[in-house]
Amino acid sequence: QSEMTAAAVTNTNTTNKRSLTFSTVTVREHRRTMYSAAVPADGGWPLGLSDEVVREYAVTGGVEQFERRKQMELRQRYVEVYERRRARFERKMRDAEEDNNGGGKKHGGRSRS
């Protein structure tokens, strides 16, 4: 959910085409919650927005700047998640190889992973 401020209507050329721009966009991010009044068509969880605001900030440069920033954040988060999963997978593969070679460490009767 976002609140847009500082709107300006401008003429872009002499043919009287108009455009609307926003110099600042205020972004308000809410926590997700189970929403009992909704039933998703695909059978997934009925999610909605809670009243709890997780983060609120202003983005200068308008909606386009907000979208660019959000895409960069999502890409960075994807890379971080991918790297963690890859490291965990490699660790499990090493542990499995050590267990197969008789070098696994036993803790309480189970292999450590």
Image: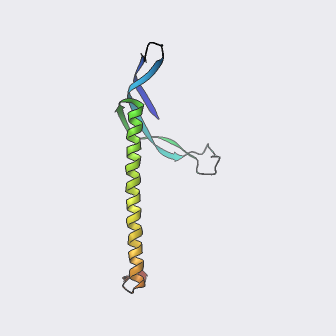
Q: Residue, x 45% and y 22% (percent of image)?
A: 20
Q: Position of residue 52 (x, y in %)?
A: 44, 41
Q: Residue, x 37% and y 56% (percent of image)?
A: 80
Q: Quadrant of residue 24?
A: top left
Q: Quadrant of residue 94?
A: bottom left
Residue 53 in sight from this viewpoint: yes
Task: Residue lying at the far front in this picture: please name it.
Answer: 14
111 versus 25 height, above or below: below
Q: Residue, x 41% and y 80% (percent of image)?
A: 97
**Left or right placement of residue 16 versus residue 112 in this view:** right
Residue 107 in sight from this viewpoint: no
State the residue in front, 59 or 93.
Answer: 93
Q: Position of residue 32 (x, y in %)?
A: 49, 45
Q: Position of residue 58 (x, y in %)?
A: 35, 33
Locate the C terminus and report the quarter of the image it occupies.
bottom left
Q: Residue, x 48% and y 17% (percent of image)?
A: 17
Q: Quadrant of residue 13?
A: top left
**Left or right placement of residue 22 versus residue 41 in this view:** left
